[in-house]
Image (cartoon, grey):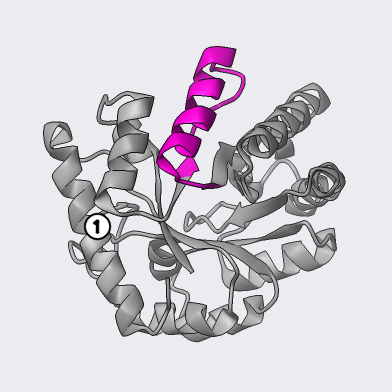
Amino acid sequence: MKLGLINSAWVQAGKGTAHGIQMTKEIGFDTIDIFADPLDIDARERRLIRTECERVGLPVVSVACVAAGLIDFNPAVQRFHVSRCKAYLDFAYELGARNVLLVLGEYIWERQVIPPAEQWATGVKHLAALGDYAAALGVEIALELEPFKLSLLNSVPNMVKFIDDVNHPAVRANIDVSHLLLAGSAPEELRALKGKAAHVHISDCDGKVHGDLPPGRGVVDFGPYLREIRDLAIDGAISIELEYSPEPDKIADWVREAYTATDRLMREAGIPR
């Protein structure tokens, strides 16, 4: 598997797009994931992302999308987010990316007003249609497991059931190591995602709340998770996710630390790059 970085690490530290891409390559990453909303950026920024990645030889693997509105109870909101997800898939196609990393969303009103099964069915319906759109472009959708108690996809069994219900080869799972720990998922549970996973995120946390820290700064025991990921034989990338560095002016050090630690963890787990 390749080792990548989500470019939000640079963006949230106030660094420009080109700078972030150049530094990602300079530090030694194989690939990059792009966190940018195609509805918020103009044609110049889209071209800059594509041409800079090509110039430095840094393939784009994934484009990250949060689309909680796909399971909103308002049909107009759902339609907008279906259209927005299609724009993300188009953007991924333009960049030559393999997948759109999609965060589906949460049950609203503590599951008390809208029947949970209705929100689940709405998500399944829209992901099946988006799977058709993705497949026509040669792109996949990788669904992210979120560790929050009201998230639809907050456990490995829920992820497996959702993917089985969608029943589309272009709709698969993303594995986020720190999210698994926070969700209380044992490494062995990942075996249920054999043939269903397309992408991996890695970061550390304090074991209590979402953190996205460089590996080694938290409590995650990465070895057992990475060995299970190795055995899944995913043809993709492990992308480091770093959010909200406490020292934005030292973001390059933060990224280098994460790169060094993750590269070591991959080698120890027997995951070749």
Observer-nearest of 187 and 25: 25
Measured as percent of width and height from the top left, residue 24 is found at 32, 44
Measured as percent of width and height from the top left, residue 245 is found at 21, 40
Q: Which residues are magenta?
A: 33-60
Q: Which class describes the residues within 10 Å of circle 1: few (<14), some (14-19), or many (20+)?
A: many
Measured as percent of width and height from the top left, residue 76 is found at 80, 22
Q: Is residue 182 above or below residue 72?
A: below
At a point 54% along the width and 17% down the height, the residue shown is 41
* Residue at image mark 1: 258
At a point 59% along the width and 72% down the height, the residue shown is 234
Decide if residue 219 is in sight here: yes
Q: Residue 34 colored magenta?
A: yes
Relative to 207, 66 lies left or right: right
Corner quadrant of residue 269: bottom left
At a point 26% along the width and 24% down the height, the residue shown is 14
Q: Residue 153 colored magenta?
A: no
Relative to 11, 187 lies left or right: right
At a point 53% along the width and 31% down the height, the residue shown is 50
Amino acid type assigned to the residue bearing label 1 in the image: Ala
